[in-house]
Image (tube, coloured by chain):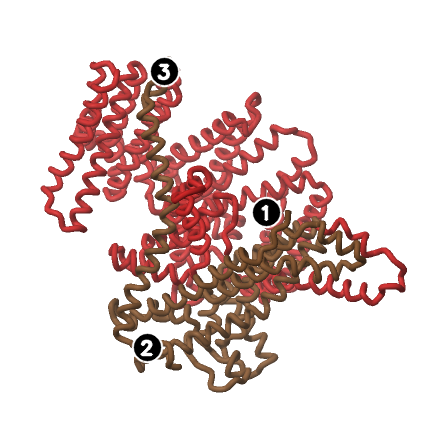
Chain colours: A red, B brown
Amino acid sequence: MAADTEGATGTGGAKFGEVSRLKGIVFEYVSLAASWVGIVALGVLLAYVAYDAFDLGTASTEWYALYGTVFGLPTVGLVAYLVRNRAGGRVAVGMSTVLLAGVVGGMAVLVLFVVLDPATWFVYVLTAGIPTAAVAAVGFGYGVDPRWQARTMLLPVAGGGLLLGAAATGGTGPAAAVELGVELLVPGVAVAAFAYAGARREAFGRVGAYAVGAVFLGALAGFGLLGAGGVFGLALPSPPVVYAAAVGAALLGVVGYVLAGDEPAESLAGVLVPGLLAASGVAGRAIAPPIAEVLAGPVGAAASAVGSLDPGIWTVYFLTLVVPGSLVAGLVARRLELVDPESEDWLAVPVTVIAAALAGSAAVAYGTGPVADLWPWFFGIVTADIYLVYLLTLLTPAALFYARGLARDRTRPETVGLAAPLVVVLAAVVAGTTAKVLGVPGPESWVDWQFVTSAASRFPERAGLYVSLIGSIFIVVLVAVFTFPLGVGAAIYLEEYAPESGWGGRLTRVIQVNVSNLAGVPSVVYGLLGLGLFVNLVNIQFGTVLAASLTLSLLILPSAASSSRGRCPAS
Amino acid sequence: MATDTGPPDLTDDGGLRSARERTYHVLLFVCAALSVLVTLAIIATLLGDAVDFFRAVSPVEFFTKTTWSPSIEGIYGVWPLVFGTVAVTVGSAAIALPVGVLTAIYLSEYASKGTRAVLKPLLEVLAGVPTVVYGYFALVYVTPALRVLFPEISTFNAVSGSIVVGIMIIPMVSSISEDAMNAVPDSLRQAGYGLGATKFEVSTGIVVPAATSGIASSFILALSRAIGETMAVTLAMGMQSRFPEALTLNELLLQPAQTMTAAIVNIGLSDVTGGSVQYKSLFAIGLTLFAITLAMNVVSDLVAERYREEYE
């Protein structure tokens, strides 16, 4: 702002105005100090916490010397170089950010996979992944309108998601997983076949899609009706009758729509599609057990053939997660032109991720001997399936970032920045290994793998934050799910739709003032709202993730709405 | 819907499309109106149980007695809690208001572009640290450090709570005040320099008075944040409600005190049965708290509106 008028104050003789200049200089430095006082205070407190958390007092002088030389010097040198090489510095910051995001995102995904056991995941891939891929293949083969194709591909995904709930409560173990998979695969293939039919005769396919959607909406309406009946004490017929009436009404609506519109009459056959799907589901249930019996044999045999790692789980994750995940990420990046679409740079993503998956899994499974003894938490505790799941989230974005860097120019100095995080991590690993080989006593850190993976305990050395961590991640994920559509919806309304004058305008202003005032309401008051509304009125169990995340969603809704509109709330 | 095939027919489907557009409009309106519903729900929830509470405990007792002892004596006098809240609010304001305004002046008048680029995100970090972490800092690091100065300080005390809450709200004061100072047009500054004023005189004599409304509104918002602050003060100041018996430093700041927010946490975490008077007292305190912060927000808006200097 006024920084460009600096010269105005410096003029005049040196003696004249000395006193007033002194006052000004003192004021400038006092305000500079004030700007830093909070930041410095926080920094000091964080330094104390780090000192205590890692118990740095217990480390020997040699350890500090070793880490200073092997880890500190290269890191400082790298940072100094990157400060001079601005472009490289920016790339390094970008790469580090992507990696850090991968580390944090990996935790969220890992929690998802802890809840979703491998069997359930496998079932999901069979029931949603394979039919979706089939629909995509059919679409590519026949050159179908991409919008129509995208809509059809949503069907198996939605169906798979619905079935997932059922599968998650079903049996466990490889045989049960295979059985459930086959059971649900049959309707999945039926969906693909129906998509194929839709691709050839679009009117039929459209009507079929409407019918499936109508059945879904009808079931939802029936569910809502029964729920409302329970709350308000209405006398409703038995649930099957309600569901049948709601679904039937929805299907009749589709028939009416087709007859009223100018769809060809024979396309009415599409109304039968949901029935065909249901029939194939029943058929799948019938043929699943014998097929599972046949398939579970080889899986079990393969399991006993490979070392310590559970090959069934590893294979499932490798084939359903790592390979397709990295391939799709690379291909999508090429399609969106994040990487050079002309070159083969996108291959960097699957190649890096798959190579890291194979090498890391081998290390985790067969890692014995001196190196493994030095890093017990990696070689002893991490299992191959945890490794694979985490790897995909951690490495795919980084590999994409790398491939994007390739697209610009292979020789520019900023590509050095890509390697910066690797150098720092390598320096840390080398320093740690050297310290352990030489037997230099390091700090007895409280923050270690055990701390992350243990539950709370009466004994400090056995305590950990695993349970709280999982709880936090759950709540964050649910809050994001609840808040994102509502916050963005409110922002779109206020920005694009809201009337500015008349009665509507007054209402808009009320909403705006209200949003900014809500941002100032203390969080503890929201806690009381959650207690009164969700726990006592809606009867959600006290102390559950659901009650907490619903309450927090209300809390951050005003901020989400304001931020989406591109302006920050008052607090 | 059925618009993706066949030759484009611009007259067709108009009804369907406008119906869809209306649906979106209504859905988006519901999203926006949800915030009003939340406000109404807060008021309804708090009022419902608070009214029940005031049937059991007379408002006269609530607003006049100086003992808060819901579980032992069954006395519900809100003044000790108000004292705790006022102590931490005044204490944190004593830190955050001067520091925040000086920061804003520095950022808007003195800082170079590079310094601003470093300082501003760092200041935002201050507000981004979870408040429970600040409470932990106060309990574990600030209080032992203060013991060097005041040997008689108790483990839970209002000073350390005020210090960390003060640090926490610095960015609120500084960012809103800085916005107000940035809005002061350069022509005013140039006029000041033209009259021979020094940079110091321009900053304190022209920019700050011109930005008064924004600065005042930032003060009020920061104070309202300090009043509503919960976890930091619960950890730092403890849960022992107390009304000062004398106006000494020890009585006022160095002993434990319970804020209104901490009292809510205390009762909420204890195993009171739903529907009891204790449980309902939660909502009475909550209502008091909500009324205070809402009033402060409204006043802040009014101040910003009423005293805003319009520059063209």
Q: Secondary structure at mark 2?
A: loop
Q: In the image, which is nearer the foreground, mark 1 or mark 2? A: 2
How far apart are the alpha carbons under marks 1 and 2? 55 Å
Q: Name the residue tied to disc 2.
A: B70
Which residue ends up furthest to the front in the rendered image?
A502
Q: Quadrant of residue A319?
A: top left
Residue at the spot 18% in from the left edge and 51% down from the top edge: A231
Viewer-proximal residue among B224 and A474:
B224
Amino acid identity at mark 3: Asp
Along the polypeptide, which appears first: circle 3 or circle 2?
3
Question: Label 1: chain?
Answer: A
Question: Label 2: chain?
Answer: B
Q: Name the residue tied to disc 3.
A: B9
Question: Label 3: chain?
Answer: B
Q: Position of residue A476 (x, y in %)?
A: 41, 50
Q: Secondary structure at mark 3?
A: loop
Which residue ends up furthest to the bottom in the rendered image?
B246
Q: Secondary structure at mark 1?
A: helix
Which label number is shown at residue A425? 1
Horizontally, residue A30 falls left or right of residue B29, namely right
Amino acid identity at mark 1: Val
Viewer-proximal residue among B187 and B65:
B187
